Image (cartoon, rainbow, N blue to C red):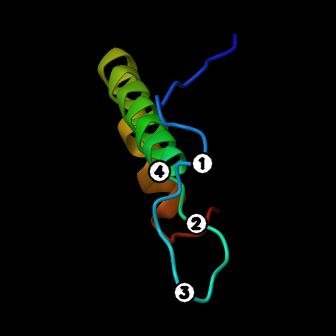
Amino acid sequence: MDLVIITNTVKGDAPLMHPNVCVPFAPTSVIIGATILHAIFAQAVAMMAEQRGKAANLAKRKYSGRKRT
């Protein structure tokens, strides 16, 4: 399955400029795309947690700092 995320930003959407940099930087499409992607991940985890009741523990296990035995 392919998924296309359309951000509706224009080509060359980098809004930031600096006198010592010759091109605009920090494109808004990247920021918007990352926000949409994380929202999709959050919704997927919420749906798994509701269906299985186990998804909520995935992040805790991975980032708790405890070593596996």
Q: CA distance from mark 3 to mark 4?
A: 20 Å
Q: Along the line of sight, which residue is nearer the eye, 3 or 52?
A: 3
x 52%, y 49%: residue: 13
Q: Which residue is mark 4?
A: 28
Dot 1 or dot 3: first in sequence order is 1
In the rendered structure, the answer to whether residue 43 lies left or right of residue 21 reads left
Dot 1 or dot 2: first in sequence order is 1
Badge 3: few (under 14), some or many (20 or more) residues near its Cα, within 10 Å? few
x 47%, y 51%: residue: 28
Q: Position of residue 9 (x, y in %)?
A: 48, 36
Q: Which residue is mark 2?
A: 24
Instruction: Name the outermost residue toward the bottom.
Output: 20
Pick the quarter of the image with the C terminus: bottom right
Q: Position of residue 57 (x, y in %)?
A: 40, 43
Q: Which residue is mark 3?
A: 19
x 59%, y 69%: residue: 67
**Amino acid under label 2?**
Pro
Q: Which residue is mark 1?
A: 12
